[in-house]
Amino acid sequence: MGLTRSYLRVARKSGVRRPLPVVAFIVMAASIILTACGSDAGASSYPIVPTDELVGRGQPIYQENCALCHGDATTPPPLASAPPHTDAGHTAHHPDRLLVDWILDGVPGGDVMPTWREELSEEEVRAVVAYIKTFWPEDVRQTQIDESQQYEEQIQRYGG
């Protein structure tokens, strides 16, 4: 409040009349434009839809980096503390954004799984998540995609 009064006092002394409505309009217009432009950028990233191209890129990355601990669609996890990524595990119960974050930066409260940010790009991890989704039956995959979309809508609405 004090800054606005100071600005108006200076504006009056310099002969500027009622600058606040013009400034408010410019700030409001810029805010609307930036919000509109920014909201599309995040919306296109999630949920991750397992296209043939994305799955094809994710499979070798998963086999090289993840299967040693988590197993694959047909084998149980060799490491007892690593959850399977099949529908027998709980991976499908989490939104894509969290899965990507956890792979890159670690699972909160977890101490076994390493972080992968130094070895894999976010796009590579997105491809791995797309490949993991092929382990699930279609109904599980679609439910997880729908729930990931709801999570993204909540982030857009409430911030995250």
Image: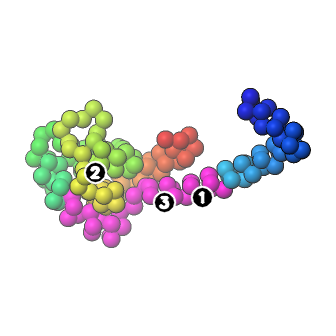
Label the magenta part by its dominant secondary structure: helix
Seen at 77% across and 47% down, the residue is: 23
- Residue 37 shows which numbered tag? 1
Q: Nearer the viewer, mark 1 or mark 3?
A: 1
The quadrant holding residue 5 is top right
Does the magenta run of residues contain 54?
Answer: yes
Which residue lies under the disc numbered 3?
44
Residue 18 as seen in the image, left or right of residue 2: right
Residue placed most toward the observer, 48 or 12: 12
**Mark with earlier residue (1, 3):** 1
Q: Look at the image and give the residue range highlighted in magenta.
A: 33-62
Q: Is residue 108 above or below residue 94?
A: above
Q: Secondary structure at mark 2?
A: loop
Q: CA distance from mark 2 to mark 1?
A: 27 Å
Disc 3 marks a residue whose amino acid type is Ser
Tag 1 near tag 3, CB within 8 Å = no
Q: Is residue 28 left or right of residue 61?
A: right
Task: List the residue tagged with mark 2.
Answer: 117
Q: Disc 1 to disc 3, how far (Cα)?
A: 12 Å
**Which quadrant holds residue 79?**
top left
